[in-house]
């Protein structure tokens, strides 16, 4: 088997005027990502996602990957990840190289799974799960005024028993948002907060202490990803677990996070971290050092599908019969047809459980009409 065709497909969706959503850093009006479709000589098609602009992914694929990928056996995908660090030597770990690699790698795993008749999670090894606990990623900041309790009420009505909310605009406002969310979710629900790197260490520590009584499962990105000393300072001053990883790329950046013990949870994004091959290495490093792994997901349906397969495989170590913290997967609740419309059978997180597809590969079928609607290269 060999790869005969590699297509880069940018897709996007624009939110209506005045309906921007965002985090403490500001509002966004575009949902944009890039898909990669790989076809083999026997007609098997695999899909992957690069969480980066299409023009950059296209250029990166053409310059660094296309010649190596065409003619390659999809079963050799892990070696492509390793070669990305050595050739190109000086910038192989950059975000755009790792994003392009992610899409190619995931598409190859999709093909491998289809070829052997197994879902990808069964091929990755580790723990096998047929369902996961979804948490609602919600309570975004919005251009249009609305009651802050509304998105949490919607999440509870949908059956979510865990949620992550946006904070990071000031301690008083942060505490109020957390108070509202906890009151609506109830005492037994898991509640995470995301500062999106908008604070200096002192500010993050102040807010962390102010919300400590609300039983926070983790604080995500309290400071910018490059501020490693800031993470260490925060870690020494608070008891709440810290999480990071959506803005880290490849095994070596994650190794530094893990070795420094600056976070309790690593969050690789399967459309940026280097794909399933790198995510498996990252998970092995993390579980070896007893650091939790929970994928970051703010992608199209393809990136979500890859993350679900990955999460279903991650080891429960050190747990055995009793698992105090079940594997959770992020489910973005902001408007995104690239997530909701792109598949013939979209993922359904309602009811507090998310089924892991059991069909071969990623276990998904692309809706061709939806793809044509949202692609931007026509």
Image: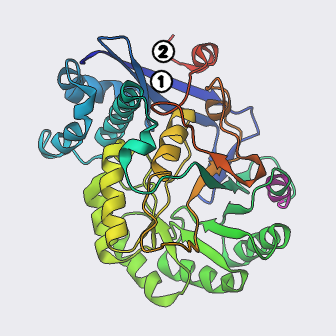
Q: Residues within 10 Å of mark 1 (few under 14, many from 20)?
A: many
| Residue found at the very far front of the displayed protein | 321
Lateral position of residue 10 relative to residue 144, left or right: left
Determine which residue is flagged by label 2: 377
Q: Residue drawn at (78%, 51%), measured in percent from left and top? A: 351
Between residues 349 and 217, which one lies in front from this camera angle?
349
Looking at the image, can residue 255 be seen? yes
Q: Are marks 2 and 1 in contact (CB under 8 Å)?
A: yes
Distance in Å between CA atoms under marks 2 and 1:
7 Å
* Mark 2 secondary-structure assignment: loop
Q: Residue drawn at (74%, 72%), measured in percent from left and top? A: 178
Looking at the image, can residue 271 be seen? no
Q: Residues within 10 Å of mark 2 (few under 14, many from 20)?
A: few
Label annotation for residue 10: 1
* Mark 1 secondary-structure assignment: strand
Measured as percent of width and height from the top left, residue 205 is found at 55, 83
Which segment did they paint magenta? 148-155
Q: Is residue 370 above or below residue 270?
A: above
Quadrant in the picture for residue 121: top left
Measured as percent of width and height from the top left, residue 170 is found at 66, 73
Measured as percent of width and height from the top left, residue 89 is found at 12, 44
Lateral position of residue 2 relative to residue 282, left or right: left
Q: Quadrant of the N terminus?
A: top left
Which secondary structure dominates the residues rendered in magenta?
A: helix
Q: Residue drawn at (74%, 33%), measured in percent from left and top? A: 17
Between residues 40 and 7, which one lies in front from this camera angle?
40
Lateral position of residue 144 relative to residue 41, left or right: right
Indicate yes or no whether the magenta region holds residue 244: no
Q: Is residue 242 above or below residue 53?
A: below
Measured as percent of width and height from the top left, residue 320 is found at 48, 72
Between residues 256 and 4, which one lies in front from this camera angle?
4
């Amino acid at each position: 088997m060999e790869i005969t065709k590699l297509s880069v497909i940018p897709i996007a969706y624009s939110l209506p005027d005045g309906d921007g959503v965002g985090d403490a850093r500001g509002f966004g009006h575009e949902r944009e990502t890039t898909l990669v479709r790989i076809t083999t000589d026997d007609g098997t098609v695999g899909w992957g996602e690069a969480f980066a602009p299409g023009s950059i992914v296209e250029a990166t694929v053409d310059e660094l990957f296309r010649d190596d990928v065409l003619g390659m056996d999809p079963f050799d995908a892990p070696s492509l990840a390793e070669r990305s660090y050595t050739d190109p030597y000086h910038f192989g770990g950059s975000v755009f190289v790792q994003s392009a690699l992610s899409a190619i790698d995931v598409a190859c795993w999709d093909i491998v799974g289809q070829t052997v008749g197994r879902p990808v999670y069964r091929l990755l090894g580790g723990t096998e799960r047929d369902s996961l606990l979804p948490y609602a990623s919600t309570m975004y900041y919005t251009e249009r005024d609305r009651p802050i309790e509304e998105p949490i009420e919607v999440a509870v009505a949908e059956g979510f028993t865990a949620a992550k909310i946006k904070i990071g605009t000031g301690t008083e406002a942060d505490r109020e948002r957390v108070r509202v969310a906890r009151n609506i979710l109830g005492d037994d629900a898991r509640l995470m907060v995301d500062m999106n790197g908008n604070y200096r260490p002192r500010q993050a520590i102040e807010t962390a202490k102010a919300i400590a009584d609300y039983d926070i499962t983790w604080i995500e990105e309290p400071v910018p990803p490059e501020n490693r000393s800031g993470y260490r300072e925060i870690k020494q001053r608070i008891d709440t677990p810290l999480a990071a990883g959506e803005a880290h790329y490849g095994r070596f950046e994650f190794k530094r996070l893990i070795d420094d013990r600056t976070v309790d949870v690593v969050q690789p994004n399967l459309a940026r971290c280097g794909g399933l091959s790198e995510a498996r290495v990252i998970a092995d490093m993390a579980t070896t050092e007893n650091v939790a792994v929970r994928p970051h997901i703010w992608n199209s349906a393809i990136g979500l599908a890859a993350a679900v397969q990955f999460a279903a495989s991650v080891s429960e170590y050190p747990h055995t019969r009793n698992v105090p913290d079940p594997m959770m997967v992020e489910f973005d609740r902001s408007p995104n047809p690239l997530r909701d419309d792109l598949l013939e059978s979209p993922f359904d997180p309602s009811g507090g459980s998310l089924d892991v597809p059991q069909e071969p590969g990623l276990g998904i079928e692309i809706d061709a009409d939806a793809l044509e609607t949202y692609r931007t290269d026509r």
